[in-house]
Amino acid sequence: MTRMAEEAFAATGLSPAYVLLLMALHEKNGMNQKELGEVLHLKPSTITRFIEKLQAQGFVYTRQEGRWSRTYLTDKGMAIQPVIQECWCTLHDRYAAVLGREEGDALTRRMYEASRLLERA
């Protein structure tokens, strides 16, 4: 699955983990590092490293707001969202081709549900 994801997201020039951070910001722009860590289930040091790399590539910027530093998508970060969506569809199609469409759809639902449950934990 990891290899399939890396191949599917190659069109973005980013690893799937970085893409997930961009997707999280697309869903809720202006999150702080703690929120991003909770959504992505990653340690603060990892989130910091991801943000720094994405800033260097021009996909995000940070702004200090009170005691929090919030991260936002740039125009470039917004512009890559359709490519990211296409990559998700490619990934889904690839594992559905192996598992069958019905099982591929079920896997997608289970992964989404598991992610939501983990966010609440």
Image (cartoon, helix red, strand yellow):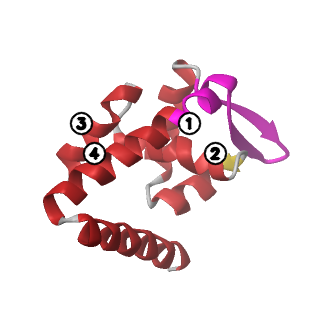
Question: Which residue is found at the position 36% from the left and 66% from the top?
Answer: 108
The crowd level at tag 1 (other Cα within 10 Å; few <14, some 14-19, many 20+) is some
Q: Quadrant of residue 90?
A: top left
Q: Which residue is mark 4?
A: 5
Q: In front of the other: label 2 or label 1?
A: 1
**Relative to residue 58, is residue 118 depicted above or below?**
below
Give the position of the N terminus as an image quadrant: bottom left
Which badge, 1 or 3, is on the more N-terminal residue?
Answer: 3
Tell me, for residue 120, which label it has, or none.
none
Q: Quadrant of residue 42?
A: bottom left
The crowd level at tag 4 (other Cα within 10 Å; few <14, some 14-19, many 20+) is some
Tell me, for residue 81, which label it has, or none.
1
**Callout 2 touching callout 1 (CB < 8 Å):** yes
Q: Mark 4 is on which residue type? A: Ala
Of residue 46 and residue 118, the one placed in the foreground of this image is 118
- What is the x, y in percent for residue 79? 61, 27
Question: Which residue is found at the position 62% from the left and 23% from the top?
Answer: 76
Q: CA distance from mark 4 to mark 1?
A: 16 Å
Q: Is residue 39 left or right of residue 15?
A: right
Q: Quadrant of residue 18?
A: top left
- What is the x, y in percent for residue 100? 19, 65
Query: Which residues, given as a range, are shown in magenta?
Result: 59-82
Question: Which residue is found at the position 51% from the left and 45% from the top?
Answer: 21
Q: Is residue 95 left or right of residue 68?
A: left
**Callout 2 touching callout 3 (CB < 8 Å):** no
**Callout 3 touching callout 4 (CB < 8 Å):** yes
Q: Mark 3 is on which residue type? A: Glu
Q: Mark 2 is on which residue type? A: His
